[in-house]
Amino acid sequence: MNSYHLPLPFVIVAAGLIGLLVGSFLNVVVYRIPRGLSVAGPRSFCPRCNRQLTWWENVPVGSWVALRGRCRTCHQPISLRYPLVELCTGAVFALVTWAWDGTIISAAYCALAAAMIAVSLIEYDGRRAPLLVAALGTGIALAIIVIGAGRQGHWWLVSGSLIGAAVGLVAVSLLRAGDPDCLDPREFGRSTLVVAGCWFGGLGLRPTAFGAVTSIVAYFLCMLGVWATTRQRSAANGGVVATSRSAVPLLSVPLVSALALAMPVALIARG
């Protein structure tokens, strides 16, 4: 039961609505952080005509539908990814809240989910996600877990989350030591190890085992996709393999894809 004894369906719906708003913010993060822009200001703007958007053009999902997927000024298409990210974040927040019965721990795992979504999208765009994005989301989650779970005496959750995050941070350090220039596109998503470590650490052994099996299977399937994609590109370029980082496709980030799939699987397995 959640801390305020509100009906669980109400809490789940509220979490989903909050997720829509967070998803809108994540769209800003994903666009601005790799370009060195501030996420605090200015207001959201059209990337083509640079006009700042009004408040009603920033309503999650609704504005995209009302504008029929086009900018009101330049009439250029607005990517479908924007409402999809908002819907996905809302759905994930609702799932997390359901899995944690609407307790305060739901907020911690929503922070982890938001960080994972942001990092994944940045990396799917062919850019390296700054470790700061993952570290900030994980830090917020850990603070909530320490306060919320610690107050209830659930120290196994606190210790598991802290250990998991620490293991993820060590793994990131080791991977960076092996590839200091970050040249291998197959190793995109290193910073997600910190988020995933905290996530799995608080779920216990059985859910983590489900997640581990899922991530291993997904990783090798993605690597198979990388191999097939590389062969196709090589054939298209006369035997020369393209190495442009901007051309990194979805299947060229197997670590991100594997963890992104394993995390909800492990959470559902907990239930």
Image: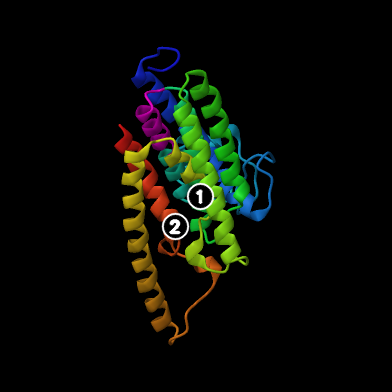
Seen at 42% across and 41% down, the residue is 200
Q: Nearer the viewer, residue 66 or 23?
A: 23
Element type at mark 2? helix
List the single residue furthest toward the top: 5
Res. 128 in view: no
Check if residue 32 falls in the magenta segment. Answer: no
> How far apart are the alpha carbons under marks 2 and 1?
8 Å
Seen at 30% across and 38% down, the residue is 269
Picture coordinates of residue 9, whole percent (x, y)? 34, 21
Picture coordinates of residue 123, whole percent (x, y)? 52, 56
Instruction: Judge left or right: residue 106 versus residue 244.
Output: left
Mark carried by residue 255: 2
Element type at mark 1? helix
Mark 1, other Cα within 10 Å: few <14 / some 14–19 / many ≥20: many
**Magenta stretch: helix, strand or loop mostly:** helix
Seen at 59% across and 61% down, the residue is 176
* Amino acid type of the residue that numbered disc 2 sits on in the rendered structure: Leu
Check if residue 93 falls in the magenta segment. Answer: yes
Seen at 56% across and 45% down, the residue is 134
Can you identify the residue that label 1 sits on? 192
Mark 2, other Cα within 10 Å: few <14 / some 14–19 / many ≥20: many
Q: Is residue 188 above or below residue 104?
A: below
Determine which quarter of the picture holds residue 226: bottom left
Q: Is residue 103 above or below residue 59?
A: above
Picture coordinates of residue 125, whole percent (x, y)? 51, 58
Picture coordinates of residue 157, whole percent (x, y)? 45, 30
* On-image quarter of the C terminus: top left
Determine which quarter of the picture holds residue 246: bottom right
Q: Are marks 2 and 1 in contact (CB under 8 Å)?
A: yes
